[in-house]
Image (spheres, rainbow, N blue to C red):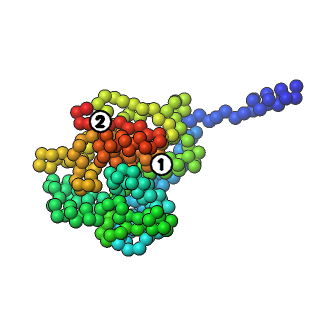
Amino acid sequence: MRITIILLWVTCCATPAAAQTRFEYSEIAMGVCARIVLYASDRASADSAALDAYKRIAQLEDIMSDYRPGSELMRLCKKAGGPPVQVSPDLYYVLDKCQELARRSDGGFDCTVGPLVKLWRAARKSGTLPDSSDLEDARKLTGWRLMRVPAACDKPGFVQLMRTGMLLDLGGIAKGYACDEALKTLRSRGIKSALIEMGGDIAVGDPPPGKNGWQIDVANAPSPKTVSLKNAAISSSGDVEQYIEIDGKRYSHIVNPKTGLGLTDRIAVTVVAPNATTSDSLSTAISVLGETRGKTLANTFAGVWVYVRRAGG
């Protein structure tokens, strides 16, 4: 009888879980609309958690932006050609991931393309292709083997850029990492059911209350296509929206590290992965490598799904 009484008391006195309400926020960060959707028990908790997530994104933008002369990334580039430089844990982690993917993709993903990207940005504004001699000079400063992380320089937390004038560009990975870190920040505040979206990158946590997953539309699909995700990420790359035509030829905003020009294959790539750092960078690599080589690369990653559509497909 005593056991029965105790069990009844626990059952009757258990506090019911607080109802979860949907809250949504948006701010401009890293040049795109950064959207946060989360479920919380009250407005104050939601607002406070979202504010912390945006602060984390802003911190990462200060570290990784190549548009801000004073960012940590640009300070590192100013020391190119010199000895190894100690960098923050965030920048070190991302650059190490860049090198890992560069090796696995045989240079299809290459964050040292900054000199080529700089030329291509100017070309997109002027509507004319870069001069061949300028491209050749930029290529001499490009190549993932010219950036050394501890495996090469034996100094944990240090990075070395081997040639003066090198420029790094983290446009193919930074937003994905920011999504992951914003989601991690929300979790640390007790928010488990959330979605972070930055441009073509989305990271999600636990599903919304009463749902099996977050319903995400696949970008650039020829007909409506939706995937259900939880504790995963999805990223899309391609030239469907961001492109320019020069002399009658269409070029993507994504630069091919080999040619120094925008991609011309006209494919749209969507990658689902366990985290947005992987989905963001891998979608860029597959765009450069093409469907066949790109899917071969993707098959070497655990928990990755790839959707590729060619123009008109």
In this view, the residue in front, 133 or 200, is 133
Is residue 70 something one can see in this rendering?
no
| Disc number for residue 209 | none
In the displayed structure, 83 sits above or below 151; it is: below
In the displayed structure, 206 sits above or below 60; it is: above
The location of residue 298, given as percent across then percent down, is 39, 42
In the rendered image, which quarter is residue 304 located in? top left
Question: Is residue 31 found left or right of 129 in the rendered image?
Answer: right
For marks 1 and 2 on the same chain, the one whose residue lies earlier in the sequence: 1
Is residue 279 something one can see in this rendering?
yes
In this view, the residue in front, 18 or 57, is 57
Please name the residue shown 56% across and 46% down the image. Answer: 187
Q: Which image quarter is the C terminus in?
A: top left
Question: Is residue 39 found left or right of 294 in the rendered image?
Answer: right
Nearer the camera: disc 1 or disc 2? 2
Q: Which residue is mark 2?
A: 309
The location of residue 33, given as percent across then percent down, is 37, 47
The location of residue 201, given as percent across then percent down, is 39, 44
SS at mark 1 in the image: helix
* Type of amino acid at the residue the image marks with label 1: Asp
Give the CA separation, mark 1 to mark 2.
26 Å
Q: Which image quarter is the N terminus in?
A: top right
The location of residue 123, given as percent across then percent down, is 19, 56
Please name the residue shown 44% across and 51% down the image. Answer: 177
| Disc number for residue 180 | 1
- Asked if the residues shown at circle 1 and circle 2 are in contact, with their CB atoms under 8 angstroms apart, the answer is no
* Type of amino acid at the residue the image marks with label 2: Arg
SS at mark 2 in the image: strand
Please name the residue shown 23% across and 54% down the image. Answer: 259
Q: Residue furthest left?
A: 247
